[in-house]
Amino acid sequence: METAKETHRTAVATAITVELQRQAEAGAQRIDVDDLADAVLRVIDPEPPVAEGRKPEELNSSNDG
């Protein structure tokens, strides 16, 4: 069973692999380190999903519908 640290390491390694593959397929001559860092940061601190619509407690007669 993987520990949390091993799972985290695997996620970071996967993000690096995917980003390097994306750059290679795009024909990059050099590694874009900023894009690589962004890929790792997205794994470490993912953005919350974009909410759609309003929560039930936000609804009232003027905006329900």
Image (spheres, helix red, strand yellow):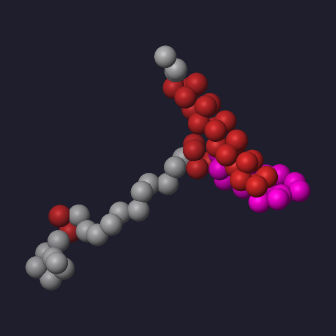
Q: Would you place residue 51 above or below residue 30 in this image?
A: below
Considering every residue shown, the one lying at the far right of the view is: 29
Marks counted in the figure total: 0
Considering every residue shown, the one lying at the far left of the view is: 61
**Magenta segment, which residues?**
26-40
Q: Position of residue 63 (x, y in %)?
A: 18, 79
Question: Is 8 positioned to the left or the right of 19 in the image?
Answer: left
Q: Can residue 37 be seen from the camera position used here?
A: no
Q: Would you place residue 35 above or below residue 5 in this image?
A: below
* Residue under the image location 41 percent in, 62 percent down: 50
Q: Position of residue 19 (x, y in %)?
A: 70, 49
In front: 13, or 22? 22
Q: Can residue 24 be seen from the camera position used here?
A: yes
Quarter residue 23 falls in? bottom right
Whether residue 31 is in magenta: the answer is yes
Q: Where is residue 60 in the image (x, y as percent from the top left)?
A: 13, 75
* Residue under the image location 76 percent in, 55 percent down: 25
Whether residue 8 is in magenta: the answer is no
Q: Where is residue 51 in the image (x, y as percent from the top left)?
A: 35, 63
Question: Is 38 positioned to the left or the right of 30 in the image?
Answer: left
* Residue under the image location 57 percent in, 43 percent down: 44
In front: 32, or 27? 27
Quadrant location of the C terminus in the rendered image: bottom left
Considering every residue shown, the one lying at the far top of the view is: 1
